[in-house]
Amino acid sequence: MLQLLTEPEYFPLSIDEIKAHLRNDLDIEDDLFLAYMDSALDYIESQTGRAYMQQTWRETFDEFPKGGIVLSKPPLQEVLSVKYYDGVEDEPVEFTEFYVMKPHADHAEIWPLTCWPSTSSTRQDKVQVEFTCGYSPVGSGSGEGRVPPRLLQALRLAIGAWNENREDEITGTITSKLKLDLDALITSLKTGRYR
């Protein structure tokens, strides 16, 4: 089970970048444009299963696996803690003897240095992993920690389409083309190939 602990502190596009894309320099709709950004980002993250902005999560498991723990929100930035209930203590015990394989990959794995400890508790959430995932803020570097350009384009497409078509019923070939473009970008973001 996943629980969001710390929400992202920034958006991948600034309000000025959104307004430039929409060719709108009025301040009156800034809140609406940011709501579009938030909705588009949420939609894309739910479709791809990825975290695009830096955020902190807790994921719980019934027990330690036979192999490595695979976290559900790539890309992993940092494992903050691995805790477990041993059946003796009321509070979780911290486990520190682990390493991370492929930290920025689609499926980073946490492995024990020797073996996982025993969990004899009857709890459903015997194992708890807290971790930071997502990409660094735009402009803070390059390479693996950089926000994928395709994400930025998918956000622009969604925001632009919602701004142009504020009603729930739309007809025509232009809208169909935009949906296909957005779907293609989301599909490419699912694969993890960003370059």
Image: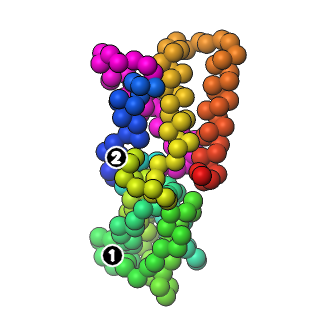
Residue for badge 1 = 93
Query: In which image quadrant can residue 12 be found?
Result: top left
- Is the residue 56 above or below the residue 116 in the image? above
Tell me the colour scheme of the image: rainbow
Three-letter amino acid code of the residue under disc 1: Val
Q: Position of residue 24 (x, y in %)?
A: 39, 17
Q: Nearer the viewer, residue 175 or 66?
A: 175
Magenta stretch encompasses residue 116: no
Nearest to N terminus: mark 2 or mark 1: 2
30 left or right of 146? Answer: left
- Is the residue 169 above or below the residue 156 in the image? above
Magenta stretch encompasses residue 23: yes
In magenta, the rendered stretch is 22-51
Q: Nearer the viewer, residue 151 or 39?
A: 151
Q: Where is residue 180 in the image (x, y as percent from the top left)?
A: 68, 29
Q: Residue 7 carries which label?
A: 2
